[in-house]
Image (cartoon, grey):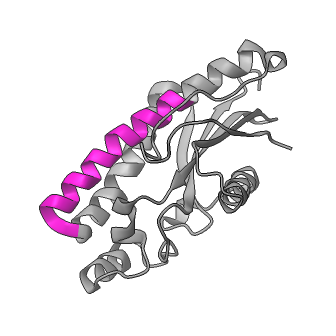
């Protein structure tokens, strides 16, 4: 069973803040280094995507932001994956992009993060473990105010039209502030395979 770690960082700072993952002494340096590397990759992904989404919202509204997200987010993930050797993606049990459907490990992380939120934990939720596939890392992607424009309960007609055009099978609507919308999911394949 994966170990869920809740680090202490203020939620108000942002979902993309990265405080240290608590690692016990027996887990050793081998787990710490991949965890730190994964955190840095998530920070880079979010650091590239979020400003572009904000700019798109300001310049062309939600419909433009949806087109940017549809094209830019996968390109950022691919670029960082190629550069780092990690497999980097976002996954959600209410996915917008059909390729973002979670695998079994990812669904377990999403469920654990949702349970933590229900228990009142709203801090920097992340999890990591060594698996048969390689080292896996997940960081909860919480719904912020910016997200509600395209993922909330009340979307305007232009936004709904853009969603239909880019994501005809969209399931990523109806969220409220602070809910787990999905995860950043990273896998560093086992080099011995």
Residue drawn 82% across the image and 35% down it = 132
Instruction: Decide if residue 26 is on the left or right side of residue 108.
Output: right
Q: Identify which residue, 79 or 31, lies in the foreground.
A: 31
Residue 145 is one of the magenta-drawn residues: no
Q: Residue furthest toward the bottom?
A: 157
Q: Which quadrant of the figure has residue 157?
A: bottom left
Q: Which quadrant of the figure has residue 145?
A: bottom left
Whole-percent x, y for residue 182 in the image: 56, 57
Residue drawn 58% across the image and 61% down it = 92
Figure check: 47 above or below 67: above
Instruction: Decide if residue 8 is on the left or right side of residue 4.
Output: left
Residue drawn 64% across the image and 23% down it = 34
Instruction: Decide if residue 29 is on the left or right side of residue 186.
Output: right
Residue drawn 25% across the image and 71% down it = 63
Whole-percent x, y for residue 78 in the image: 44, 41
Residue 161 visible to an observer of this rendering = yes
Residue 81 visible to an observer of this rendering = no
Figure check: 28 above or below 140: above
- Which image quarter is the N terminus in? top right
Q: Identify which residue, 82 or 173, lies in the foreground.
A: 173
Q: Which residues are magenta?
A: 39-61
- Which image quarter is the C terminus in? top right
Residue 43 is one of the magenta-drawn residues: yes
Q: Identify which residue, 70 or 122, lies in the foreground.
A: 122
């Amino acid at each position: 069973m994966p170990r869920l770690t809740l680090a202490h960082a203020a939620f108000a700072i942002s979902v993309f803040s990265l405080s240290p993952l608590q690692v016990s002494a027996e887990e050793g340096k081998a787990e710490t280094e991949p965890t730190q590397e994964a955190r840095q990759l998530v920070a880079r992904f979010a650091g590239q995507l979020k400003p572009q989404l904000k700019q798109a919202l300001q310049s062309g509204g939600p419909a433009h932001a949806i087109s940017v997200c549809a094209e830019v987010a996968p390109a950022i993930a691919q670029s960082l994956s190629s550069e780092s050797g990690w497999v980097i993606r976002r996954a959600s049990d209410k996915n917008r992009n059909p390729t973002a459907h979670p695998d079994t490990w990812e669904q377990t992380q999403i469920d654990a993060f949702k349970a933590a939120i229900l228990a009142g934990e709203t801090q920097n939720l992340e999890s990591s473990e060594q698996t048969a596939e390689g080292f896996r890392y997940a960081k909860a992607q919480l719904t912020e105010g910016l997200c509600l424009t395209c993922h909330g309960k009340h979307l305007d007609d232009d936004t709904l039209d853009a969603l239909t055009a880019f994501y005809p099978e969209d399931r990523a609507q109806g969220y409220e502030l602070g809910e787990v919308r999905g995860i950043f999911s990273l896998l560093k394949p086992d080099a011995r395979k």
